[in-house]
Amino acid sequence: MGWTDERVELLKKLWMEGLSASQIAAELGEGVTRNAVIGKVHRLKLSARAKPTNTAPRARPAARPAAPRRVTGQTSGATPMSAKPRVSMARPQVMGATALAAAPEMEAELYVAPAAAELFIPEDKRLNLLQLNEHTCKWPIGDPLNKDFYFCGQHSLESGPYCEFHSRRAYHQMDKRRR
DNA sequence: CCCTGATTCGC
DNA sequence: GCGAATCAGG
């Protein structure tokens, strides 16, 4: 389905309301991807919605070396790659600029000591700096200045320097506090 | 990992 | 004009 006047209007409305591209895509439904939405948004030249501060220069990657696009016909076997359907993302969750605008101040101390929220690593599994290798989790535990300092040492993921547990620690919930 | 928008360019 | 692939960032 193409971009009918109706759909374009809905797009504009939702975009201006601060919904993310993927959320708008879900709203429009019928095979509309977030990329399609973003692409359209750009063509309509209505990128900048609420711009509180800064005019991010945004460094352009400067012309890519014309990477080999997708192979047209080719329907041979072999699964492409990460073929994850990811269909159900019907989620009312609000985020982004909208979330920021809606949540003025929520400082305070609602963050209680996470002290004991750490994995227990048996002494014989703990590693010092020299015992680390490409397959050991390099998440540091304890005070580096103390002698009770050690590294997680569990088998690390192929995708990173940490084990599954610490990988999520490192990337995921590293929320809040921007500067 | 999850996600966000920005950009390019074959179609 | 369209949007997948890619990139940069949180």
Image (cartoon, coloured by chain):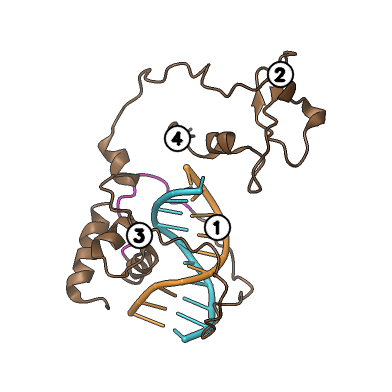
Chain colours: A brown, B cyan, C orange
- Find disc 2 in the rendering and name its residue: A123
- Give x and y (percent) for residue A20: 32, 54
Magenta stretch holds residue A114: no
For the residue labelled by badge 3, is the local secondary structure a helix, a strand or a loop?
loop
Choose mark 3 or mark 1, whichever is in front.
Answer: 3
Query: In the displayed structure, does residue C7 sit left or right of residue A111?
Result: right
Which disc, if any, is residue A140? Answer: none
Choose mark 3 or mark 2, whichever is in front.
Answer: 2
Furthest-left residue in this view: A6
- Find disc 3 in the rendering and name its residue: A87
Q: Earlier in the sequence, mark 2 or mark 4?
A: 2
State which region is magenta. A46-56
Q: CA distance from mark 3 to mark 2?
A: 44 Å
Quadrant, the N terminus of chain A? bottom left
- The chain letter under disc 2 is A
For the residue labelled by badge 2, is the local secondary structure a helix, a strand or a loop?
helix
Q: Earlier in the sequence, mark 1 or mark 4?
A: 1
Furthest-right residue in this view: A130
Instruction: Let me know if marks 3 and 2 both belong to one chain.
Output: yes
Q: CA distance from mark 3 to mark 1?
A: 33 Å
For the residue labelled by badge 1, is the local secondary structure a helix, a strand or a loop?
loop
Mark 4 crowd level (few <14, some 14–19, many ≥20, 10 Å Cα):
few
Q: Earlier in the sequence, mark 2 or mark 1?
A: 1
- The chain letter under disc 4 is A
Which disc, if any, is residue A175? Answer: 4
